[in-house]
Amino acid sequence: MKPTRVLVLNSGSSSVKYQLIDMADKSRAAAGIVERIGEGAVADHREALRIVARELDGQGLGLESAELAAVGHRVVHGGTAFTEPTLVTDEVLETIRGLVPLAPLHNPANIAGLEVARSLRPDLPQVAVFDTAFHATMPEYAARYAIHTAVADKYGVRRYGFHGTSHAYVSRATARLLGKDPSEVNSVVLHLGNGASASAVAGGRCVETSMGLTPLEGLVMGTRSGDLDAGIVFHLTRVAGMSTDAVDSLLNRRSGLLGLCGDNDMREIGRRMAAGDAAAQLAFDVYTHRLRKYIGAYFAVLAAETGGTVDAVAFTAGVGENSAAVRQAALQGLGALGIEVDAVRNAVRDDSARLISTDGSRVAVAVVPTDEELEIAQQAYALVSSA
Ligand code: AMP
């Protein structure tokens, strides 16, 4: 029988997450995480993947299994080189290595995962699925920054976008929820996790997204500022005397919700708001105001790109799936855009994809749990099945 299982590996800088998914019925045969890589017990990614292999072996599902069709790897940055899931060869690995300057924290860990998995099962197809790929369909005028073209081209400075696997999965799942083909649906997808990004998807194709050269641009996030005046960077280096690394750390790790109120977990912010905490309330208001700006902008972008209207706004990831308060506040007063949230439906807690708009709302509002692992498995399996 043809092998139907795909091992999905998400190798981060200090952890490796894995899921073994059977594409015959999309069931999870195994899942786990190896954490604290580089902190002693787990020396490096080679050791981490050995642990993954051992954990799978223990369940009789080892890497040696003949039932394995492929390994699907999450790779954060594909630059302009990779716009599709890609079978990993020496040449492909070399190109991904060349993209390390664009994602210095992420791509090296992804590469380590790829190298080790290849060495453990050289005969098995290894498929790289890129976080940037879904956004490659953005028109050039959306992908360009308005800076000198020669500088931009020489250093790869353009808008790539991230969370693409999630935006792809959620935009398709939203179309399914509406009983339509993705090609018939225009949607605004809001991936609100610790990292957060928005995308405008026209008939299944991404036409705009909020993250840029790096994941710093766009929405307010748990610890990242999102959009700001680039002049702030000069101000902080010249006037505050901060180093480049200090500004980088400030904007990526000590800003966003955390910087505004000292907490980056929306649950805690909700508790503090209920107790009348002004800083938590302001952080929430900055967060939801930014969301509204993007929703409005993407309604205009989708109207211009399609000549049609927006069919759905979809919320996903930790905050998007769980915070009724954020969804309510982000869409409050947007009746003029055809958006009406049903307060009762919004308050229901449920793990399945669902609609929270009123029956009369022109735009459907959806809550769609994201499943990046399944999306990676599907893309990897489709690639090896078509070969
Ligand atoms: P993610 O990056 O998708 O795992 O999302 C993580 C974030 O989701 C956390 O930092 C929380 O802010 C948020 N989150 C998780 N569960 C809840 C919840 N029940 N209510 C509100 N926010 C939540």
Image: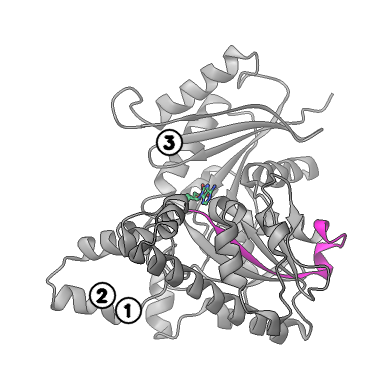
Q: Earlier in the sequence, mark 3 or mark 2?
A: 3
| Quadrant in which the C terminus is drawn | top right
Q: Position of residue 42 (x, y in %)?
A: 36, 25
Q: Position of residue 123 (x, y in %)?
A: 63, 28
In the displayed structure image, the side of residue 381 where residue 9 appears, left or right: left
Q: Does the numbered disc 2 mark a residue whose Cβ is under 8 Å from ligand 1?
A: no
Which residue is found at the position 69% from the left and 44% from the top?
351
Q: Residues within 10 Å of mark 1 (few under 14, many from 20)?
A: few
In the displayed structure image, the side of residue 70 where residue 18 appears, left or right: left
Against 282, residue 306 (above or below) is below
Q: Position of residue 378 (x, y in %)?
A: 72, 44
352 falls in the magenta region: no
| Quadrant in which the N terminus is drawn | top right
Depth check: give the residue in front, 386 or 220: 220
Three-letter amino acid code at disc 2?
Val
Which residue is disc 3 drawn over? 15
Q: Which mark is residue 230?
A: 1
Is the Cβ of the residue at disc 2 closer than 8 Å to that at disc 1? Answer: yes
Q: Which residues are magenta?
A: 176-193
Three-letter amino acid code at disc 1?
Ala
Q: Which mark is residue 233?
A: 2
